[in-house]
């Protein structure tokens, strides 16, 4: 009897995408196979087998992917998310797109109607399962992130210039709803916490830039019902992503094929 190996579609072939591709194609024990790889720059995928390269993302349905994993930019979810969920399961790593309340509602509605699934990978955050399980209990949830200045994209921040940051600087403090569009490539952890827990408007977020740091530091706090959870994690950085994000993303893909429909933390 032949066991079906889920076909994974990868959107983005950068730091994380290359790692996931290499792991899936060299480790039969994962039980997965590549359905397609799409990258905005065709040059980056020129050395891949031509039959695996998807030039036009609009043609994704021709590849029969069991799960599409976005590793590129929140715009992918904005433009293609609903189309993906009409046909298959979807795991976006650029979770800041979900801070758009209307888009979030449309995506979750599509998943429910079509019986497909949106997976929220835990990425650099430990404890998302506890946030989800205690969602009705938590009175307050906060996430604080400190990052090296070199790992921050401040293109949408009108108040700060990376070249001018010479010491530890608080870039933002406020809700997840507010922070996500300002730092769409840097605060996917904040979006994951909001999705797993009490939502974008009630999740309190802090982002700190520190030129002396070599790692990203995440501190997660949740309180309610007499319970308090405090988690701290340090994650060495590679570009805008942490090293632990490689392993956690691959693990999330492996877990994604065993849960029921709807939005799930994995």
Image (cartoon, helix red, strand yellow):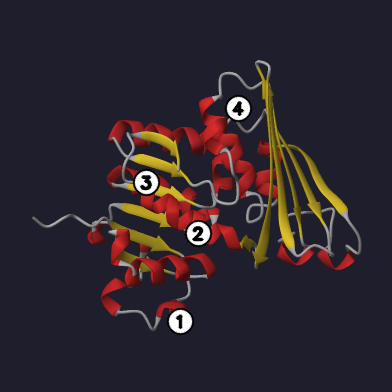
Q: Alpha-carbon distance for marks 2 and 3?
A: 14 Å
SS at circle 2 = helix
Q: Is residue 9 left or right of residue 100?
A: left
Residue 180 picture location, percent across and down? 66, 45
Q: Which residue is mark 1?
A: 43
Q: Which residue is mark 4?
A: 198
Earlier-in-chain disc, 3 versus 1: 1
Circle 1 residues within 10 Å: few <14, some 14–19, many ≥20: few
Residue 9 picture location, percent across and down? 34, 60
> Comparing marks 3 and 1, which lies closer to the viewer?
3
SS at circle 1 = helix
153 lies above or below 182 = below
Q: Alpha-carbon distance for marks 1 and 4?
A: 42 Å
Instruction: Name the quadrant of the N terminus.
Output: bottom left
- The circle on residue 247 is 2
Q: Alpha-carbon distance for marks 4 and 3?
A: 22 Å
């Amino acid at each position: 009897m032949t066991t079906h190996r889920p076909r994974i579609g990868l959107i983005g072939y950068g730091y994380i995408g290359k790692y996931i591709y290499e792991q899936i194609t060299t480790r039969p024990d994962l039980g997965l196979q590549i359905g397609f790889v799409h990258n905005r720059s065709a040059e980056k995928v020129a050395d891949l087998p031509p039959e695996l390269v998807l030039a036009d993302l609009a043609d994704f349905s021709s590849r029969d992917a069991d799960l599409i994993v976005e590793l590129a930019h929140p715009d992918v979810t904005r433009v293609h998310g609903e189309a993906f969920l009409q046909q298959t399961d979807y795991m976006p790593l650029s979770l800041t797109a979900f801070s758009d309340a209307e888009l979030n509602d449309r995506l979750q509605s599509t998943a429910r109607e079509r019986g497909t699934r949106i997976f929220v990978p835990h990425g650099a955050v430990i404890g998302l399962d506890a946030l989800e399980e205690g969602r009705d209990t938590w009175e307050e949830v906060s996430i604080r992130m400190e990052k090296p200045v070199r790992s921050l994209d401040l293109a949408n921040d009108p108040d700060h210039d990376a070249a001018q940051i010479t010491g530890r600087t608080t870039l933002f403090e406020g809700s997840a709803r507010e922070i996500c569009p300002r730092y769409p490539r840097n605060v996917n952890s904040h979006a994951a916490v909001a999705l797993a827990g009490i939502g974008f408007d009630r999740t309190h977020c802090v982002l700190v830039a520190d030129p002396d740091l070599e790692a990203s530091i995440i501190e997660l706090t949740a309180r309610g019902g007499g319970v308090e959870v405090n988690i701290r994690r340090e994650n060495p950085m590679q570009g805008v992503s942490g090293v632990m994000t490689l392993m956690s993303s691959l693990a999330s893909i492996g877990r994604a094929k065993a849960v029921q429909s709807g939005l799930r933390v994995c």
